[in-house]
């Protein structure tokens, strides 16, 4: 019997958006590969995936089942987490959809088509110079088909399937509307991502589950013979710049007039007093200064598109060296995907269950359980079999493998990797390296390895430079409470209780062998934060070109405070903030902060 759906409500919309987001996440790399407009910087898939990730985080947390509230949570998530041109356009689309669904519990097919019409109009308003042949064109064609069919079709299943076909036709036509797409032999990446979203929506509404469609097949056909160099062009404005603005009684026209002179690709997303702005410019700080005249500026992001374009050109050829790490490595998702890092998950024990870190359970879920007092939460090293599976998958595609892991002095993770690697001694060169650190310290080293591989260095050069990098990295972890160290058994209860009574707060680090050492101790939280920042800055000033990253265990606000203080000494420095891996957070505890610094020795210039 055919499924017939007469309305969509909050529950259906939430689930279909989550399915759609997964479709974009699955196709992220393929979207990156065909990204040539407005700049061939190879990040459309990553940006759309990041935007959808922010959306599903907000949607999943929405307890109200009404369509109105679900739409608003989706819009808020998109506004806060949008990345890049396509992400910003999606954010404005969902903001318009939320406004059109205000106060509604459910929508008929005709009401849905009307709401989508409003959303697409808002998406066009976001751009100061909309172009034919982009995601906007496909959105518009899809919306028109919805409106035409809704007049005669009340069933959502048939309605969405019909409109999806029109969107696919519109997508196929994008190269005829933008010369850069035709020259490169690809469709618009943002438009392709939007079609993936529509596929997920249609699949869920028609089947009630994620249909096992081969989403990548038709896209794979489109990118055969595609070479990024065909899309190479002059990048007039170097930095992709984004920020969130809080401003009352601000007019869109005012923002456009003031910022248009700073660059191009200006996209303005608004929701009440909150504004998300995207622009390509040569002077990001001047843009931020102008915006600060209207209100508080936050969530700033600056990306070097010329550097991204060069990296994308390098990725046009498959690297010869594969890069493997374990899930104690803390890095932004986009960095892991950029360098194609293979991550072997650590095991997390929660009561009687054993779960794979960041596969079967998220870091945030682990910390929430820890904070709630759930007993018996711990981590364990991956089995050699986990490494065998990864190495086997890589052995036929690469000339060699670098496997960089958590300090061998802290865990048997390194030994498990070494055991697995010995099985491949006659097939492929696998170098298992001890990072002598963890968390963001390991993350910076993995990113450094990825950068060297991307730039074409051979295995021996990458290995040699990594050993130098390991010797010139530091990790500082501040411990706001001794409760978790006592709970894990790394600190005796008698010593822990005495130190707690005295309000002693330790800062730990790792020595040259990767063993835990005390870097300092203070009395009180304020001194703890200041001392940790001071130690981090002190080390960063001793090396050339310091790379810095911060991790936190449910303490993002304090992590941002750390970043602000460090940036006072290193203006404009990109300092990513990530959640600390459970291997660190379960011992350091809720509220802990880790700062990692990696630099070059004074006599060595970075390549």
Image (cartoon, rainbow, N blue to C red):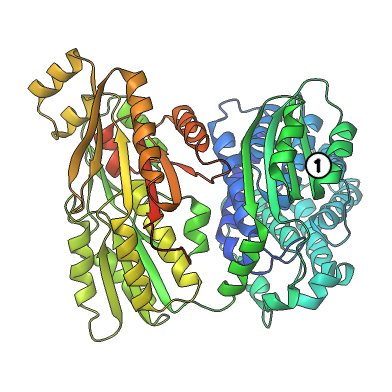
Left or right of 223? Residue 378 is left
Visible in this render: residue 107? no
Quarter holding the N terminus?
Answer: bottom right
Visible in this render: residue 601? yes
Q: Position of residue 590 (x, y in %)?
A: 33, 29
Residue at horizontal 72%, vertical 41%? 91
In the rendered image, the residue lying farthest to the front is 603
Residue at horizontal 37%, vertical 75%? 461
Is 104 rendered above or below residue 379?
A: above
Left or right of 58? Residue 192 is right
Q: Residue 518 sits in which quadrant?
A: top left
Using the image as rendered, state which of residue 85 and residue 135 is in the foreground.
Answer: 85
Q: Label 1 crowding class (10 Å Cα cut-off): few <14, some 14-19, many 20+?
A: many
Q: Position of residue 508 (x, y in %)?
A: 24, 36
Is 208 rendered above or below residue 415?
A: above
In the rendered image, the residue lying farthest to the bottom is 426
Q: Position of residue 215 (x, y in %)?
A: 62, 66
Q: How many marks?
A: 1
Tag 1 secondary structure: helix
Using the image as rendered, state which of residue 597 and residue 163 is in the foreground.
Answer: 597
**Residue wearing tag 1:** 109
Is 393 rendered above or below residue 55?
A: below
In the rendered image, the residue lying farthest to the top is 501
Q: Position of residue 558 (x, y in %)?
A: 45, 28
Q: Residue 372 sits in which quadrant?
A: top left
Residue at horizontal 20%, vertical 68%? 418
């Amino acid at each position: 019997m055919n499924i017939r759906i007469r309305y969509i409500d909050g529950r259906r919309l939430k689930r279909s958006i989550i399915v759609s987001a997964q479709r974009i996440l699955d196709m992220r790399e393929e979207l990156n590969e065909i990204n040539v407009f407005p700049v061939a910087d190879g990040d459309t898939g990553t940006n759309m995936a990041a935007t959808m990730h922010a959306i599903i985080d907000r949607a999943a947390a929405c307890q109200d089942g009404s369509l109105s509230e679900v739409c608003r949570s989706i819009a808020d998530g998109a506004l806060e987490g949008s990345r890049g041109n396509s992400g910003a356009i999606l954010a404005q689309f969902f903001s318009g959809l939320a406004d059109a669904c205000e106060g509604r519990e459910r929508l008929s097919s005709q009401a849905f088509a009307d709401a989508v019409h409003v959303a697409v109009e808002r998406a066009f308003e976001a751009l100061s110079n909309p172009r034919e042949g982009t995601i906007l064109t496909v959105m518009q064609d899809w919306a028109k088909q919805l409106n035409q069919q809704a007049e005669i079709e009340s069933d959502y299943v048939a309605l969405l399937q019909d409109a999806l076909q029109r969107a696919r036709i519109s997508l196929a036509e994008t190269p005829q509307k933008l010369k850069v797409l035709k020259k490169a032999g690809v469709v618009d990446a943002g438009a392709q991502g939007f079609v993936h979203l529509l596929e997920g929506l249609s699949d869920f509404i028609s089947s009630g589950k994620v249909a096992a469609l081969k989403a990548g097949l038709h896209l794979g056909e489109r990118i055969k013979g595609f070479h990024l160099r065909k899309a190479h062009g002059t990048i007039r404005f170097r930095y992709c710049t984004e920020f969130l603005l809080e401003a009352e009684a601000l007019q869109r026209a005012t923002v456009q007039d003031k910022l248009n002179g700073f660059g191009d690709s200006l996209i303005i997303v608004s929701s009440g007093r909150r504004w998300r702005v995207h622009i390509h410019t040569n002077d990001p700080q001047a843009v931020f200064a102008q915006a600060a005249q209207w209100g508080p500026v936050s969530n700033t992001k600056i990306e070097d598109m010329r550097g991204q374009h060069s990296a994308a050109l390098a990725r046009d050829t498959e690297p010869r060296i594969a890069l493997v790490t374990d899930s104690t490595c803390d890095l932004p998702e986009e960095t892991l995907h950029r360098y194609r890092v293979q991550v072997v998950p650590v095991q997390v024990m929660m009561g009687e269950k054993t779960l794979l870190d960041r596969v079967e359970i998220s870091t945030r879920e682990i910390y929430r359980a820890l904070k709630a007092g759930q007993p018996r939460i711990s981590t364990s090293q991956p089995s050699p079999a986990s490494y065998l599976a990864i190495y086997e998958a890589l052995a036929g595609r690469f000339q060699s493998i670098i496997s960089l892991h958590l300090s061998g002095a802290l865990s048997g993770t390194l030994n498990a990797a070494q055991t697995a690697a010995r099985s491949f001694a006659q097939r492929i060169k696998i170098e298992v390296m001890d990072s002598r650190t963890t968390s963001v310290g390991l993350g910076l080293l993995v990113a450094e390895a990825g950068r060297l591989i991307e730039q074409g260095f051979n295995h021996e050069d990458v290995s040699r430079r990594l050993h130098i990098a390991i010797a010139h990295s530091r990790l500082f972890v501040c411990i706001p409470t001794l409760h978790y160290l006592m709970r894990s058994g790394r600190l005796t209860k008698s010593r822990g209780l005495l130190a707690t009574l005295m309000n002693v707060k330790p800062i730990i680090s790792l020595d040259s062998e990767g063993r835990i050492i005390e870097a300092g101790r203070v009395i009180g939280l304020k001194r703890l934060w200041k001392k940790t920042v001071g130690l981090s800055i002190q080390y960063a000033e001793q090396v050339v070109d310091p790379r810095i990253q911060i991790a936190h265990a449910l303490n993002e606000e304090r992590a941002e405070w750390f970043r602000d203080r460090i940036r006072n000494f290193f203006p404009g420095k990109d300092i990513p903030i990530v959640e600390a891996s459970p291997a660190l957070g379960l011992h350091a505890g809720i509220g802990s902060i880790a700062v990692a610094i990696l630099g070059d020795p004074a006599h060595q210039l970075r390549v």
